[in-house]
Amino acid sequence: MDYKFLNKILVAHLIPVLPTAFFSTQMCSVQGRSIFDGLTPILLAAEYLHRHKQLGFLISLNFFHAYDRVSI
């Protein structure tokens, strides 16, 4: 019971500062942000390159395979 009470107090104090503690690209655990918002910068970058007729590359990194040999 004490841990639940302490947890509620900590959460109440941390929620107001979470948006300033995370990077603008952080999508999880920040009120008002959605995982789907992560697509917006990618689409905007692709549209910019297309409009200005510039070459660009899109790289997709699979972090599961990057850490498959590490025990977390």
Image (cartoon, rainbow, N blue to C red):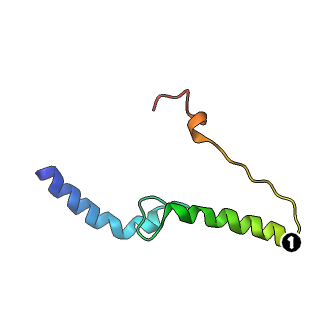
Residue 45's quadrant in the figure? bottom right
Q: Among all residues in the image, which is located at the extreme left?
A: 1
State the image coordinates of residue 3 (x, y, percent, origin top left): 16, 50
The residue singled out by tag 1 in the image is 52
Residue at point 86%, 71% (across, down): 52
Horizontal side, residue 57 vs residue 63: left or right: right
- Tell how many labels: 1
Q: Is residue 63 above or below residue 53?
A: above
State the image coordinates of residue 68 (x, y, percent, origin top left): 55, 30
Residue at point 21%, 60% (across, down): 8
Q: Residues within 10 Å of mark 1 (few under 14, many from 20)?
A: few
Confirm whether residue 23 shows in the render.
no
Q: Is residue 26 above or below residue 63?
A: below
Horizontal side, residue 50 vs residue 19: left or right: right
State the image coordinates of residue 17 (x, y, percent, origin top left): 38, 68
Residue at point 21%, 62% (across, down): 9
Confirm whether residue 26 shows in the render.
yes
**Callout 1: SS:** loop
Which amino acid lies under the numbered mark 1 shown in the image of this protein?
Answer: His
